[in-house]
Image (cartoon, coloured by chain):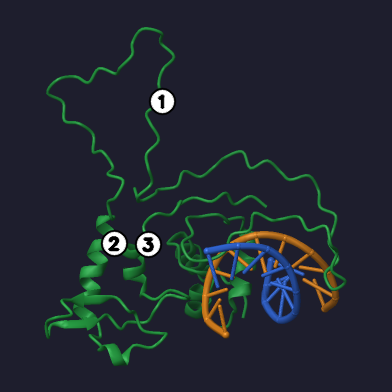
Chain colours: A green, B orange, C blue
Amino acid sequence: MSWTDDRVDVLKKMWGEGQSASQIAKELGGVTRNAVIGKVHRLGLSNRATSGGASKPTTPKADAKPKAPAKPKEPPKVASTEIAEIQEPRTESASPAPQPKVPFARRQIIPAGQPLPPQPSANEISPEALRKVNEVEKSAKKISLMELTEKTCKWPVGDPATEQFWFCGLAVQQGKPYCEAHVSVAFQPMSSRRDRRR
DNA sequence: CCCTGATTCGC
DNA sequence: GCGAATCAGG
């Protein structure tokens, strides 16, 4: 299949929405995720807010692999314009407000009567994630302990001393013991941004 | 082993 | 331009 205009449109749209290459490929049909990624690159729309997948800070390996001869690369072009990325205010400890180098004004004066800006609490779970969990727990499979497998979310719900106790049981995220929603509340402390220069 | 995107390179 | 093969990482 070829990259017709509307197929490219779909690609652009989905990629912009943060869909993975494989999802896009699946949607389009007739192409592999490699094809999608290749096209994405050719179109020049590369970086975006990625969640799941890859990231390669490219560790230059000294050892040459016989199979993959490294091709001498040209000086990296300077990506001058960073695309402003919208980001959820996760649990990132906010860096202190930049202190102006004014010798005397030691503290910032906050105008009286003005509502204070929301202070990100260090141990807060994003409302997004919580909302997701609530949704999930309604549609959870509610499996029992014995039904747990390596592919079922092991997030417990309810009081084990009660009959109203079950495990989420949805499909786990790779490697993790929980489904996506529960992973996002279980593992909060994560640096959210990784440099993606190659 | 599942997945992610990035890169290379023959076509 | 295309995308499979490969790479590198979560």
Q: Name the residue under label 3.
A: A187
Above or below, A140 against A98 in this view is below
Helix, strand or loop at disc 3? loop
Label 3: few (<14), some (14–19) or many (≥20) C-alpha neighbours in 10 Å:
few
Label number found at residue A98: 1
Q: Can you tell which quarter of the image residue A69 is in?
A: bottom right
Q: Distance between the residues labelled 1 and 2?
A: 30 Å
Residue A177 located left or right of residue A44: left
Between discs 3 and 2, the one toward the N terminus: 2
Helix, strand or loop at disc 1? loop
Do circles 3 and 2 both sit on a common chain?
yes
Between discs 1 and 2, the one toward the N terminus: 1
Label 3 with label 1: CB-CB less than 8 Å: no
Quadrant assignment for the N terminus of chain A: bottom right
Q: Which amino acid does label 2 sit on?
A: Ala
Between discs 3 and 1, the one toward the N terminus: 1
Residue A159 position in % (x across, y down): 15, 76
Q: How far apart are marks 3 and 2 (CA)?
A: 11 Å
Q: Distance between the residues labelled 3 and 1?
A: 29 Å
| Visible residue check, residue A127 | yes
Label 2: few (<14), some (14–19) or many (≥20) C-alpha neighbours in 10 Å:
some
Above or below, A130 against A101 in this view is below
The one nearer the camera, B10 or A85, is A85
Residue A24 located left or right of residue A40: left
Label 1 with label 2: CB-CB less than 8 Å: no
Label number found at residue A129: 2
Residue projecting furthest to the front: A161
Q: What residue type is labelled 1?
A: Pro
Task: Please report, as a chain letter, where disc 2 is located.
Answer: A
Task: Please report, as a chain letter, where disc 3 is located.
Answer: A
